[in-house]
Image (spheres, rainbow, N blue to C red):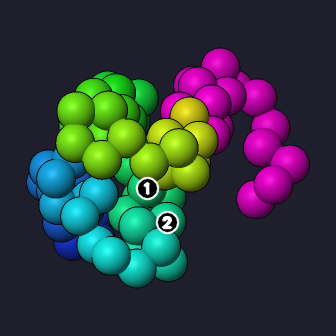
Amino acid sequence: MPNRESENTSTLTPEQRLTPASFDVLRACIVTISDVETVRECVAYENAHQNRKPILRRLAQRASELRAKEDGAVDLCE
């Protein structure tokens, strides 16, 4: 049985992920990113549009978390 939640979040465009005005919703959209390529797309979108430093920092943090998982490192924050 497919996981609908991950299916729905993986189909969001960078614009859909980064448009919400609420920082809490933005944070949730970033946390649900499941691959580094999507993070890169979101960084490119953010750089081209609003260039918000806190959002770019969160995206960098998410990319770091994903790379650590790919490398098999233990994430102490979870």
29 and 9: which is toward the camera? 29
Residue 26 figure quarter: bottom left
Q: Residue at x 58, y 25 (%)?
A: 67
As for residue 70 lying within the magenta part, the answer is: yes
- Is residue 1 visible in this depiction of the protein? no
CB atoms at circles 1 and 2 under 8 Å apart? Answer: yes
How far across and down, in percent of the image, does residue 29 sit? 37, 63
How far across and down, in percent of the image, does residue 36 sit? 41, 29
Q: Residue at x 16, y 53 (%)?
A: 15
- Is residue 18 visible in this depiction of the protein? yes
Which residue is the site of mark 1?
Answer: 30
22 and 41: which is toward the camera? 22
Residue 66 is left or right of residue 5, and the answer is: right
Query: Can you say whether 41 is above or below 20 in the image?
Result: above
Q: Mark 2 is on which residue type?
A: Arg
Residue 52 is left or right of residue 61, and the answer is: left
Which residue is the site of mark 2?
Answer: 27
